[in-house]
Amino acid sequence: QLAEQVDQPEPAAAFYREALSQKGQDPRVNYYLHNNLAYCLNQQGQFVEAVQHCQAAIALDPSRANAFKNFGSCLQGLGRWADAAQAWIKAVHVDVSDRRALELLEKLIPRHDEKIRETIPDIDQQLEACRRAYERAGTGRFSDWARGLTLN
């Protein structure tokens, strides 16, 4: 993870691969290894392999948004615009408090609007639903606490 944090995705990927080769790990650890390896592979433009690791991470824990976000990035890198949009929509639904998936979706749609609409004709409604969900998640006492604000 340290190699990843200092923007060295190639050595980080090697470390994650080595850790995955060790058998009998906790499924939660395997989720992070697959997800983080996918992120590193995306950084290197190795989208085909990254897809496999995203799918493995999602299979291990579909309640975490990061693997869906990384999956969307792989698919975008492969030119699969509608599939990327669907992955980011899923990421928003899994964790509405994390704005990154929504931001990626909002950037993608105008760039590839026609191709996305072929597969997702109601993309405008889905995007608006994601925005509303995020806005609702951003209100209330829990979200204030999660952002580190002091409550009186």
Image: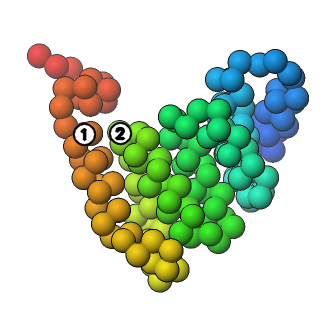
Going by the numbered disc 2, the residue's amino acid type is: Ser
Q: Residue furthest left?
A: 152
Q: Secondary structure at mark 1?
A: loop
Name the residue nearer the viewer: 42 or 121.
121
Q: Secondary structure at mark 2?
A: loop
Q: Position of residue 92 (x, y in %)?
A: 41, 48
Going by the numbered disc 1, the residue's amino acid type is: Gly
Q: Earlier along the polypeptide chain: callout 1 or callout 2?
A: 2
x 59%, y 32%: residue: 61
Near mark 1 (Cα within 10 A), the count class, few <14, some 14-19 or many ≥20, is some
Q: Position of residue 36 (x, y in %)?
A: 68, 38
Q: Position of residue 26 (x, y in %)?
A: 71, 18
Q: CA distance from mark 1 to mark 2?
A: 7 Å
x 64%, y 23%: residue: 28
Q: Is residue 5 above or below residue 74?
A: above
Q: Is residue 94 above or below residue 32?
A: below
> What colour scheme governs how the chains and residues are painted in the rendered image of this protein?
rainbow
Near mark 2 (Cα within 10 A), the count class, few <14, some 14-19 or many ≥20, is some
Check whether the beta carbons of the residues at disc 1 and disc 2 lie within 8 A of each other: yes
Horizontal side of 1 relative to 145 (left or right) equals right
Where's the N terminus, which quadrant?
top right
Where's the C terminus, which quadrant?
top left
x 65%, y 71%: residue: 79
Q: Say which residue label 1 marks.
A: 138
Horizontal side of 59 relative to 81 (left or right) equals right
Q: Is residue 7 above or below residue 142?
A: below
Query: Any mark on residue 97, and which?
Result: 2
Instruction: Residue 106: tell me if it is visible.
Output: yes
Instruction: Write down the quadrant of residue 32 in the picture.
Output: top right
